[in-house]
Image (cartoon, coloured by chain):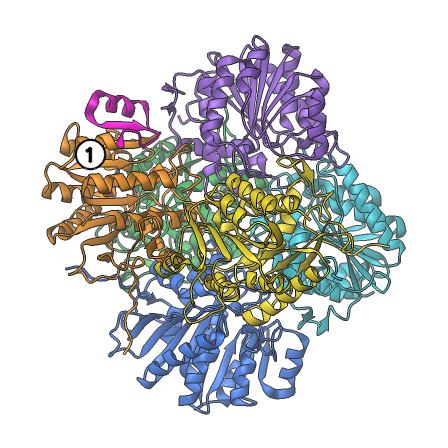
Chain colours: A green, B orange, C purple, D yellow, E blue, F cyan
Amino acid sequence: MLNRNIENFIGCDASYEESKIVIFGAPFDSTTSFRPGTRFASRAMRADSFGLETYSPYLDRDLEDAAVFDSGDLELCIGDAKMALKDIEERAGIILEDGKLPVMIGGEHLVTLGAFKAALSKYPDLHIIHFDAHADLREDYLGAGLSHACVLRRCWELTGDGRIHQFGIRSGDRSEFMWAQEGHVEMRKFDFDGLEKCLESIQGKPVYLTVDLDVLDPSVFPGTGTPEAGGVTFTELLEALGKVCRMADVKACDVNELCPSYDASGVSTAVACKVLRELLLMLRV
Amino acid sequence: MLNRNIENFIGCDASYEESKIVIFGAPFDSTTSFRPGTRFASRAMRADSFGLETYSPYLDRDLEDAAVFDSGDLELCIGDAKMALKDIEERAGIILEDGKLPVMIGGEHLVTLGAFKAALSKYPDLHIIHFDAHADLREDYLGAGLSHACVLRRCWELTGDGRIHQFGIRSGDRSEFMWAQEGHVEMRKFDFDGLEKCLESIQGKPVYLTVDLDVLDPSVFPGTGTPEAGGVTFTELLEALGKVCRMADVKACDVNELCPSYDASGVSTAVACKVLRELLLMLRV
Amino acid sequence: MLNRNIENFIGCDASYEESKIVIFGAPFDSTTSFRPGTRFASRAMRADSFGLETYSPYLDRDLEDAAVFDSGDLELCIGDAKMALKDIEERAGIILEDGKLPVMIGGEHLVTLGAFKAALSKYPDLHIIHFDAHADLREDYLGAGLSHACVLRRCWELTGDGRIHQFGIRSGDRSEFMWAQEGHVEMRKFDFDGLEKCLESIQGKPVYLTVDLDVLDPSVFPGTGTPEAGGVTFTELLEALGKVCRMADVKACDVNELCPSYDASGVSTAVACKVLRELLLMLRV
Amino acid sequence: MLNRNIENFIGCDASYEESKIVIFGAPFDSTTSFRPGTRFASRAMRADSFGLETYSPYLDRDLEDAAVFDSGDLELCIGDAKMALKDIEERAGIILEDGKLPVMIGGEHLVTLGAFKAALSKYPDLHIIHFDAHADLREDYLGAGLSHACVLRRCWELTGDGRIHQFGIRSGDRSEFMWAQEGHVEMRKFDFDGLEKCLESIQGKPVYLTVDLDVLDPSVFPGTGTPEAGGVTFTELLEALGKVCRMADVKACDVNELCPSYDASGVSTAVACKVLRELLLMLRV
Amino acid sequence: MLNRNIENFIGCDASYEESKIVIFGAPFDSTTSFRPGTRFASRAMRADSFGLETYSPYLDRDLEDAAVFDSGDLELCIGDAKMALKDIEERAGIILEDGKLPVMIGGEHLVTLGAFKAALSKYPDLHIIHFDAHADLREDYLGAGLSHACVLRRCWELTGDGRIHQFGIRSGDRSEFMWAQEGHVEMRKFDFDGLEKCLESIQGKPVYLTVDLDVLDPSVFPGTGTPEAGGVTFTELLEALGKVCRMADVKACDVNELCPSYDASGVSTAVACKVLRELLLMLRV
Amino acid sequence: MLNRNIENFIGCDASYEESKIVIFGAPFDSTTSFRPGTRFASRAMRADSFGLETYSPYLDRDLEDAAVFDSGDLELCIGDAKMALKDIEERAGIILEDGKLPVMIGGEHLVTLGAFKAALSKYPDLHIIHFDAHADLREDYLGAGLSHACVLRRCWELTGDGRIHQFGIRSGDRSEFMWAQEGHVEMRKFDFDGLEKCLESIQGKPVYLTVDLDVLDPSVFPGTGTPEAGGVTFTELLEALGKVCRMADVKACDVNELCPSYDASGVSTAVACKVLRELLLMLRV
């Protein structure tokens, strides 16, 4: 008798019961204002993860020893952000209830709002570490509040001041930067300077880590909807992720904004896969 | 003194006052369920129209003699179908009120609903001639009623039975075909057989013509979100459009579902431009 | 508790026990002499099958009613044709032993040899119906006998004269055409003329159907390693497949030579998916 | 001792002395008004010709038996049409003087002017058979007389009325069509109707055959600078070429306007190669 | 009443009268010796500028406060460098006469010659700051003097020794480097070392700034005709531009050699847009 | 009389007799486990080398002064690694016997085994300097010993411990890294640290230099089958090559793993060409 065709991110073959980390995909990009297509990210990453090794020579650890389960993609209602966010919140909620750490693959950045809500409801004093090229702090975007460009603002509405910590930001409209400077969020422009100090300041707090991969320079990661020159290197991102995972108590996380069709070389998908592998091996669970 | 940079579809340089036909773009694709990107169609068509002549050797007419005005693209709220449809309805309404014929460039097929509403409010006994590969007759799509896959069903809710006439249909789920067979709409599968008879039957009625360009075979028109093998040829489409424009009283129309980024050869955009040129020259105004 | 990520060709969700048809992928292309990449076909078809409906308006049947199981891809040793063919033969053999009809997705055309051997061992008087642009009848290719360019010749060595029936052939070296004319195989150049007569002549015999998708014109199906202008249309192929499935006793079959990366529009993959859907619905099991 | 790296169009390996046909490439596209890139055509055709067989099942002839020499590409001064045309005229002249038939691979269509001049100087009563989507009959293009859009007009200035015979034309500005109708040239729109009659009328005359490959429908041949929907099929073109080669006394010819980079599938280059192979085998020398 | 479709580079919406800086496009690439296509740069930059913010977090300035007018593209005669350069010179001349600073978007680098001439005629002691991978100092290119490969040599003929200052140069033939070393121009290889010293040495002089974007490393900016590994980073270019704009009296400038079709990811166009935004905000007017 | 079409890598026009370095291509990629296509590298490099100058401003040397002969590509049996390696060994052997230095252009990395064998038979104490992202030290890959993933292991079987020196390695399975640590090979992870010390330690020994271009960061070199983020820069690679060529006695070398079709921008091919030019100019012969 033959088996069904199971497709996991490479090395994520633990049973649900034994797993400590659970991956899921959130293929949604309906509010992407410039170039859409991140809905195809999770599928592309699973497929191309087979060009990657399970072993990390950086960490000398192997995904085959990590206890990771890949629960596949949600079937989200393209075109209806509210319904999509509700489904995302529910999936993240189940994983958290089961005592596991959810790792979401976006989709556009708006999907963070769903998973963050689930985590916030379990960890009311949750902080956000946010790596991104874009501030995502708008009040609304052409009238819509549920937009990728507003996602951190929506999160802030749930946490209040001082709980969001942004790094690598190099794009936004003037009002976003001014609003940040008013002290609502901690924003570090261009790079990761001050990350360690920030992590020390929130030691002991639960943390939601959200990684918009466009924080990387477009030379490293061209496959994204809104490439922004002047970003961080792959090595800088790995080091920053290492610091977060070592120093902070990450309870949930996501990587998002890979848009595979904009990089036919496959490099961006390969980079996203490698970031995810390293992250999965870094998370302390 | 230098002038601002005006970009029109080639040959559409009449003043608004003298124009009889008014083009506008509806760059919206938030509900596209498979592969998005039609939001870039109108801009690509304007740019590549300069590879096209204004003269049609088919019709021996020239766009330079037609009185067409290009009013540019709407700025639609990506992610919010309701708001987008309202803006579309408003633009089409203005053009109709001014006694001109609106020609909308989509965008995904859902945009038709906005323009159709505007035309229906002026012509309550409006019929729809619909060329498409897909039936677009679903009750809902993953829970959403405002979806490209439901757009003709939404139109039907406004007109009732017998007012929608579909040609070229070769894809849909079983329930759509069954629902059509119950007599709610007239559906011709695969080709344009029966078009003349249909046009005779609605002679004298005002008509909204909606052309989903994926009615064309993907060999002719690969640049679309959901290519469906087995479509009509370019010549067959031109002939069918000619029949509609000669025999029916077209009051408004649209061409939609070009997704330029899926056809890097530029052929699909060139085909869309040529269909639009011929249509503009065929319309009796 | 969450489920693993199962990925099937759309609508092929029957259990193995209840299934009558079993799909498997043979991602192998090591002997491709010109442009490789067919190894990615089966995965691309599963992914893009979600742009396709399960319902066929041609046949008025639905994959959801067919009893098809998708057993996923073999993990074949790239670079070693012998080992790969052995694994293919084994998988096809299991399916045939279990009384089900194997449908293999290539891969390059050489994979046919493995599945054909399995079927031949169950049905010693097996005939081959072969749709292709290329004759594939070489004695060897640069010294290698196990090559896509020789696959039908290798099959012929197992069957002897008169058991292979080729249609649509429009490419090969002179010696292949001369060898065919000596009567070893029945070869119809360019189209499907004579197919019905051929099918009548082998009525009652078991048949292996192998469809090299490059029999289609490259305008319809550009995504293949060696495109050959002057091929058949999609409709002609559908009709020919319909005749084979109605008139012949197909015991096993394959579709092969889709190379998705050569057609970034996705049309070729969509065409392959539609051919497979129609074939699955046509097969009498 | 090792040999230098010789690269010919497949099967064109005769010595110059024994050859009856001589190929050369004219990689020039400086006046291309829309999308440039035909300068890469001849090189791409040589490279991809190795995906083609030397044997034609249409004609049952083989390039290995034809006496064709490939003299490589001219090094033309990009940016200076006059200098480029002079070099082309010289190369074609040498081949004609040596009693051989020149077959030029363009480049944009302007290159025809150089080779035509060389042939006209040997055959003063030379006629032109011209297959193209575009009339190429403009007096000038933005002030420049040496433009691809004017090439047949420049030829006409050398021959006078009645010596140019155009087929497949489906694009141009109104003045070109009007000028043609004044009787300066014979123009057949859209297809090859009347070709045989035309060929009969010029029986015995020397003929220059120029094939702008965009006469093909863009579905068959997307890789060209200015694709024009509504063209002829591959089979129709082969048949028309067969008629010309059988009925007319072709003294020189060219195929032009392949722009390989616009068709990443490689199909257009493959089509161009196959057209060239058939043409080389059809020419009576 | 509806408005015409105006398309500006983002945020460049000042009236001509109030503007201090005037953009224009010079879509010309007829002399490009390797891979053409820069003619599409200005249009692509306007279109994709909408993925960019008007606000610069580097400078804390906003294009909405700058007084920039976008006068669109010239319609240049493709194929005739002399005519094209004359039109460019005329447009730049009008802008300079009106007391505004012209910012030209190329096109290939030859276009600089036209704008430079206009500026030189107003500022006879004009210096050139030249950022580029290529020296562009050839006497001629395959016989043509008006070639992108000779543009700085042509400028030198107008200025004499010591007025051209090149940075980042890493490609050229030997004679170009030797000629530069003879002291005709100041050439800095590979990077911007010595830029400040150079700027000090020409303090008070009027400056024409020409930026060939291929000075950037191809990892950052792959979309150019002749990519040269080993270039500067985006940050290094920004810093160098900042120095020039702060320390020198820039009277006119250009950015050129973006070839959008060679970078389907859109990153190169995004980089060019960001360089232009920063430059527009840096210029002291 | 006209000449045949000779195509060399730019500037490699010496006669075989006078040449000291001989290039050949090994277009083989049958064992590539992830994404194939390196078979097209040597041809692409010859074609695109014409976008490169023969002069190096890094070294102030010119290929026109170097004595390099380009012997073209081997015609290797795709699908049969043993036969291919034998042909490669033979070609490298002829060049070595003639007292010249072979420079092979891959192809996948397995081709190194053939050329290395030829060199080892002339220089029994040959060492290998290996630049790569991947360790390539597997015992077998899915059962096959002749695989790109095993090539250095196969070489080790011929040399024993201590003769292979790897730099830049950042990918492999755990067992490869463990096996290396057992002392069989010298492996430096991620970068070139320790290269000089290594070169000192093998001073006076003959060296085979093998450069897998994926040692470069994918931002610099995306066009490869298995891109691995975190690689070295172009400048770092040039410097490392300079050290090897100055300090070691290189007897044979290769550059491999360019897969041109994965980088449509052409940058990767341009980078490979520039690496090859610099290497040819650095080699002491």
Whether the magenta-drawn stretch holds residue B239 is answered as: no
Tell me if A102 is positioned left or right of F94 in this view. Answer: left
Tell me if F123 is positioned left or right of A13 in this view. Answer: right
Toward the top, the furthest residue is C204
Residues A125 and E64: in front is E64
Task: Provide the residue designation for mark 1.
Answer: B154
Quadrant assignment for the N terminus of chain E: bottom left
Residue C158 position within the rendered picture, expressed as x and y whole percent measured from the top left: 71, 17
Whether the magenta-drawn stretch holds residue B189 is answered as: yes
Tell me if C178 is positioned left or right of A223 in this view. Answer: right
Q: Is residue F5 above or below residue E76?
A: above
Residue C259 position within the rendered picture, expressed as x and y whole percent measured from the top left: 55, 37
Q: Is residue B199 above or below residue D274?
A: above
Residues A91 and B20: in front is B20
Circle 1 packing at 10 Å, graded few (<14), some (14-19), many (20+), is many
Residue B101 position within the rendered picture, expressed as x and y whole percent measured from the top left: 18, 50
Residues A41 and C209: in front is C209
Give the secondary structure at mark 1.
helix
What amino acid is found at the position of numbered circle 1 in the picture? Arg
Q: Which residues are magenta?
A: B172-195
Subunit under mark 1: B
Q: Quadrant of residue D117?
A: bottom right
Residue at the location (86% across, 62% down)?
F17
Q: Is residue C33 above or below residue B169?
A: below
Does residue B145 appear anywhere in the picture?
no
